[in-house]
Image (cartoon, rainbow, N blue to C red):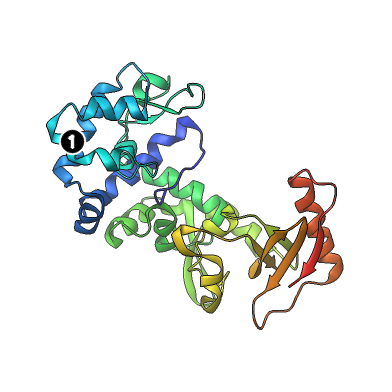
Amino acid sequence: MRGTLHAMRSADAAEYLSLLAGARTWTKPAWSRHFGATPEEVDQLTESVADLLDGQALSRDELVSELVRDKRFTGMEEQLRSGWGALLKPLAWQGALCYGPRRSSKVTFTNPASFLKNWNGLPDPAQAAPAVIKRYLSVYGPATPETFDAWLSRNSNKKSTLKAWFASLGEQIVEVRVEDEPRYLLAEHEDELAVTQPSHVTRLLGAFDQFVLGPGTKDTHMLANEHRSLVSKAAGWIAPVLTQGGRITGVWEMDDGNLVVTPFPGEQAPPSKALEDAAARLAAVHGLAKVTPRVG
């Protein structure tokens, strides 16, 4: 999702990939200009790679060396060899490529049809969407279709498509309001939400934590817009954050074994005991004997 690596059960992967492939982000003019491949060239590349990886695993170097024997792909060699793998992502979304068994220190690629026993190709997006949306709402609901699409593909799907996907869930979801904004929740969680008490817990979450990435840093209920640049930084970096009561109220970093917590301007530092408890949990996660917190 969003061009980044995610870990998931292989049995569920095809449903996510179906939605990513259906968005066809590589057909947008900006994508073609930036990565130097037209939609037609990506289609040709997808077909060639699927054939090359059928029944075998190749390292990146081996795969690219085979591809550039074809004059159609010689101009893509630099992008294909890039560690960012931008030209390989549309191929992965379409089910033509996945990671294979590691070979010494090198990763390999293979065709998922050759590697996964439960692989049956990509389902139709309309069939896959309900299952993916239900998984998302089970963790991040109440949420909007736009928030779901931002998490999935940086809002690459049409609003009409999202509306149809959510409507297909029927009575499995209910509409609730968060500060007068309509959002959706799994119907089975409606009663649970009604008795949930506000949280006052202090947490120190690592970089790229799923609590942050699920709703996204544009969700102003969780992160004030004026502080977004302190969390979502250059080159896609998501900083480690301090949360209080479910809201992001600061950031933190480790400095020579000391934990430096920096609340946002206008936000109060957490109580000393709450911060010490959060630091102890952080130390346990990182296998450290002790972490000493300090408010910066």
Q: In which quarter of the image is residue 242?
A: bottom right
On the picture, is 11 further left or further right than 43? right
> What residue is shown with label 1?
74
Residue at the image point whose x is 29% and y is 19% from the top = 54
Picture coordinates of residue 258, whole percent (x, y): 78, 60
Q: Between residues 99 and 192, which one lies in front from this camera angle? A: 99
Q: Between residues 91 and 113, which one lies in front from this camera angle? A: 91
Please say whether residue 220 is visible from this viewpoint. no
Residue at the image point whose x is 48% and y is 74% from the top = 181
At mark 1, the secondary structure is helix
Within-10-Å neighbours for mark 1: few <14, some 14–19, many 20+: some
Picture coordinates of residue 136, whole percent (x, y): 50, 50
Does residue 219 lie above or below 107 as drawn? below
On the picture, is 267 further left or further right than 102? right
**Amino acid marked by disc 1:** Thr
Residue at the image point whose x is 44% and y is 43% from the top = 131
Picture coordinates of residue 260, whole percent (x, y): 73, 65
On the picture, is 191 further left or further right than 238? right
Q: Between residues 92 and 161, which one lies in front from this camera angle? A: 92
